[in-house]
Amino acid sequence: MINKFIDKNMMVIDVGNTNTVIAVINDNGIDKKWRLATLLNRTSDEYTIIFDSFLEGAFDRNDITNIIISSVVPSVVYELKNCIHNYFNISAKIIGTDIFPDIDILLDRPDEVGADRLVNSLAAFKLYGGNKIIVDFGTATTFDVVNDKGCYLGGVIAPGVLLSMDALDKATARLPRISISTPTKVIGDSTVSAMKSGVYWGYIGLMEGIVSKIKLEYEKDIDVIATGGLASLFNEDTDQINIIDDDLTLKGIALTWNSKLSVFNK
């Protein structure tokens, strides 16, 4: 019989271009989760203060038995790993350097695929089966395809929602910074409402268009799994998303360490 969890409390860290998510995973699944901005110049001592704050009242540092990092920002890994060594007395494992997702990558240059895309694909296959498109609404909006055997076939990378909103703000003289939300109607009756409508419906159109093209090229039945903070928002106005899993990346990091974990199957 497979043990649900071989570590008392595993910490997984997903370092993205915009945000870093830290979670503690145990037999309860994802027990605690924290989010902070990804800063390139954050020091080891600053990470120590952050860990102290996050763990206070929830876990003792000695409760953490293993730490796995997935990072698409290589420059932050040194200080983060150094902090972990000094604070937890643990040597953190880095995905892509120390450990690798158990997934066949059917590309000419597999080393070019980001760790986040691979752990997403691994989690999608392990938890939901093959023939999947994984859409991650992150700093970039990525579309990754896994076949019926769990092999990674490649995907699509498009600018992310926040990047596009930031470009509108910085590259134009009179357009204001906006937040993303569901517009009340398509035709905006002000500059702000027109921008919100453009971003919202534009990205739904982008997602539906790319998904339909992938399905046409794939020529088999394939479901869509969406993850990232905006997945639930966009799901309100599209019928293309079959599954939403906001924690897919965190689960994929844990499954990279132990692909037989059953704790997420509750």
Image: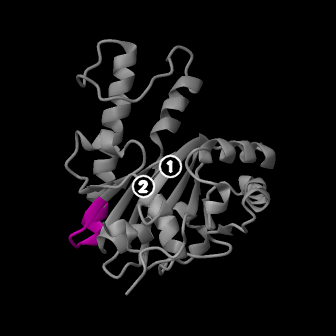
Q: Position of residue 246 (x, y in %)?
A: 39, 51
- Residue drawn at (56%, 60%) of the image: 12
Q: Residues within 10 Å of mark 1 (few under 14, many from 20)?
A: some
Residue in front for this viewpoint, 236 or 133: 236
- Residue 114 visible in the shown view: no
Does 119 appear above or below 237? Answer: below
Q: Position of residue 74 (x, y in %)?
A: 70, 57
Residue 134, image quadrant:
bottom left
Q: Which residues are magenta?
A: 214-224
- The amino acid beneath tag 2 is Asp
Q: Position of residue 250 (x, y in %)?
A: 48, 59
- Residue drawn at (57%, 16%) of the image: 173
Q: Is residue 10 left or right of residue 247?
A: right
- Residue drawn at (73%, 42%) of the image: 49
| Residue bearing mark 1 | 33
| Residue bearing mark 2 | 247
Whether the residues at callouts 2 and 1 have beta carbons within 8 Å, the answer is yes
- Residue drawn at (29%, 12%) of the image: 189
Q: Residues within 10 Å of mark 2 (few under 14, many from 20)?
A: some
Residue 89, image quadrant:
bottom right
Does 4 appear above or below 172? Answer: below
